[in-house]
Amino acid sequence: MKIGILGCGRMGSMIARMAVAEKDLELVACVDSDSPGEGELCGVKVSRASELEQVLREKKPDVVIDFSGADATAANAPVVLRHSDAVIGTTGLSAAQTGEIGRLVGENGRGAVISPNMALGVNVLFSVVEQVARALPLYDVEIVEAHHRTKKDAPSGTAKRLAEKIGREAPIHAIRAGGIVGDHTVIFASQTERLELTHRAHSREAFAAGALAAARFVKGKKGVFSMKEVLGL
């Protein structure tokens, strides 16, 4: 299966390195908004964002994995979905942007997995939190998330998705410090007990592995999917 990567920062670079190590995957295209058009990633030229259409037309990736910024993802989605299926792990997408991407998926007869967090464990946490929230409707709920100091959005897209799964008021506390890869804790508390559900990412490899699993899942499918479908939850 041919893979393209859009957004070649830390996450995109990690996905590229893991993809070239897999026997069933071939990295054929890398595109980044900051590229001078001269660099390489895992032996593949990193093209400018302005060259996206040309690169996709020539390289014909089956799936493009997008870990760029929210505005870049929204702007590039019409081009990407004309040429391939997509895995979108970009955080900070608005409801309007996500809805428009969904419309483009249908218009082009493509498939897309959209998730603010591709880590397999986090997506299991989404399902567990939903179940606990139903079982403990009278408990207070709060979310604490921590990421590295350079993360642009706060609260994280994952924390917002956890709040959606809870389905009632759940304040979010965001920490931005040092090199924290990503921690999320959901606290359910009553006067007599407390239940805490925590996911900690030790390495960005967790997100990259999930993105590649999503790419394998979505190839040739039609419609918008989440990691819940990828995992069969």
Image: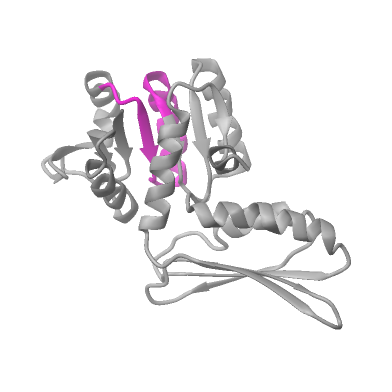
Percent position of residue 176, x then y: 48, 73
Residue at position x 28%, y 35% in the image: 49
Residue furthest to the right: 138
Residue furthest to the bottom: 192
- Colour scheme shown: one colour
Residue 2 placement: quadrant: top left
Residue at position x 31%, y 47% in the image: 15
Apparent side of residue 165 relative to residue 99 in the rendered image (left or right): right
Residue 102 placement: quadrant: top right
Residue 48 visible in image: yes
- Please determine whether, in this image, residue 217 is positioned above or below residue 93: above
Percent position of residue 68, x then y: 38, 45
- Please determine whether, in this image, residue 73 is positioned above or below residue 119: above
Q: Nearer the viewer, residue 134 or 11?
A: 134
Count of numbered circles in the view: 0
Q: Is residue 140 magenta?
A: no
Q: Nearer the viewer, residue 55 or 3?
A: 3
Q: Is residue 64 magenta?
A: yes
Percent position of residue 118, x then y: 48, 49
Residue at position x 58%, y 44% in the image: 94
Residue 75 visible in image: no
Q: Nearer the viewer, residue 116 or 18?
A: 18
Quadrant showing the N terminus: top left
* Highlighted magenta segment, given as a residue range: 60-85
Residue at position x 26%, y 50% in the image: 13
Apparent side of residue 212 relative to residue 232 in the rendered image (left or right): left
Percent position of residue 53, x then y: 30, 23
Quadrant showing the C terminus: top right
Apparent side of residue 91 relative to residue 76 in the rendered image (left or right): right
Residue 83 placement: quadrant: top left
